[in-house]
Image (tube, grey):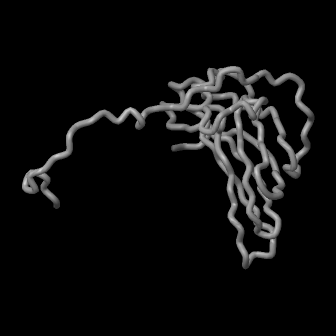
Amino acid sequence: MLDIKKLGYSFSKVATPWATARPPSTPGVNSKRGVLKSVRFPVSLEAAMSVEVMRPDALRSRQDKEDHALEEVLVVEGIEVQDGNFVKFDVYVNAVEYHKVLPGGREQAGSFVSLRHPATEERVKTSMTVALNELLEDLGVKEETSVTVTMVPVKGKVKIGGLKIVYMSE
């Protein structure tokens, strides 16, 4: 094993504020759902789409989640990419006005990217999971019974099979 003392050098102790930093929520973004269009899955994601997703009933408090080591996750099921082409779409939580959210904004839950597969001439079918515990806490909606999920296509054609929120063990 490497002994730093024998080398005669040691690294200075510095703070690492980025280790626990979280992006701020975006001011002025409308998180109110209003009346959302009814969506029947599967659906082709051709334009931005907002869907109200119900959360599981049990274990909403932070203490319950920590006691059971559970992470609340959003599952985007049945993602179908035609002919193995490049596809990207962004996922926002409680940001109906997604265009106001800057890159790295707290409301942006994640992105799905599938790179082009030249040898693949068939459909690629997969899913995506996004951790929600910290996100819901930061947005102040951890006690809500549902959240609004907005999916925004960036590139390519994709079909979405469904959305649900479940608990997963860490």
Q: Is residue 136 left or right of residue 30?
A: left
Residue at 60% x, 32% y is 135
Question: Which of the two residues, 140 or 145, is positioned nearer the viewer here?
Answer: 140
> In the rendered image of this protein, does residue 63 appear above or below residue 103?
above
Asked if one can make out residue 116 in the rendered structure from this viewpoint, the answer is: yes
How many marks do you count on the picture? 0
Question: Which of the two residues, 84 or 13, is positioned nearer the viewer here?
Answer: 13
Residue at 57% x, 23% y is 61
Q: Quadrant of residue 158?
A: bottom right
Asked if one can make out residue 42 in the rendered structure from this viewpoint, the answer is: no
Question: Which of the two residues, 53 or 97, is positioned nearer the viewer here?
Answer: 97
Q: Is residue 104 left or right of residue 66?
A: right
Quadrant position of the N terminus in the picture: bottom left
Residue at 77% x, 55% y is 155
- Position of residue 138 measured from the top left corner of the image (x, y, whole percent): 58, 25
Q: Quadrant of residue 40?
A: top right
Instruction: State the residue lying farthest toward the bottom.
Output: 119
- Position of residue 48 measured from the top left corner of the image (x, y, whole percent): 83, 41
- Position of residue 21 measured from the top left corner of the image (x, y, whole percent): 46, 32
Q: Quadrant of residue 159?
A: bottom right
